Image (cartoon, grey):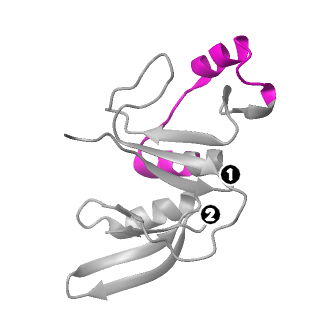
Amino acid sequence: MTLHWKLVIDASDPHSQADFWAAALGYEVEDNSALIGRLSAAGAIGPELTLEHGGRTAFRDLVAVRHPDDSYDPESGTGLGRRILFQRVPEAKTVKNRLHIDVHAAPGERDAEVGRLTGLGASVLHQVKQPGGEFTTMADPEGNEFDVQ
């Protein structure tokens, strides 16, 4: 049996994180506005659970990004393939990630990719050179570590 899965990342500001990672990976921020409209009309959720972001209604405390080539459910806007979900949590990040994303730049383009990601709001933590390879460890706008290979 094959399981469907998504990566979930805790965030102080899920929408800013989703915007960063969508731009970083070339993913799309999921549009859940049709689902939210149906839930609101049915009285299942109130306005305190939503906000306006990117010109559309979104859930206040969670948002996902999905690969643009993967299918999605048009009724909910939820991706059915590669996804990263950002969920609001009250506490700030305090320790090193136990799980991280590796971004693979095209051959010879790592420095350019690091520059592009820095322009989106990431920061360089350090460069690593070891017998198995070379990479740059960066942090996203909320401090989550990731590597650029």
Q: Residue 44: x, y in percent? A: 70, 20
Q: Do the residues labelled 2 and 1 touch (CB within 8 Å)?
A: yes
> Residue 81, percent across and down?
33, 36
User: Does 45 lie within the magenta span?
Assistant: yes
Which residues are the magenta region?
19-47
Q: Position of residue 94 (x, y in %)?
A: 63, 75
Instruction: Give left or right: position of 86 versus 98.
Output: right
- Residue found 26% across the figure and 59% down from its top: 106
Q: Which of 52 and 38 is in front in this view?
A: 38
Disc 1 is placed on an element classified as: loop
Q: In which quarter of the image is residue 39?
A: top right
Q: Which residue is drawn at 48% across and 41% down?
A: 65
Determine the residue positioned at 55% across, 60% down: 119
111 lies left or right of 32: left
Marks 2/1: CA distance? 8 Å
Relative to 73, is 50 above or below? below
The kind of residue tagged 2 is: Glu
Residue marked by disc 2:
142
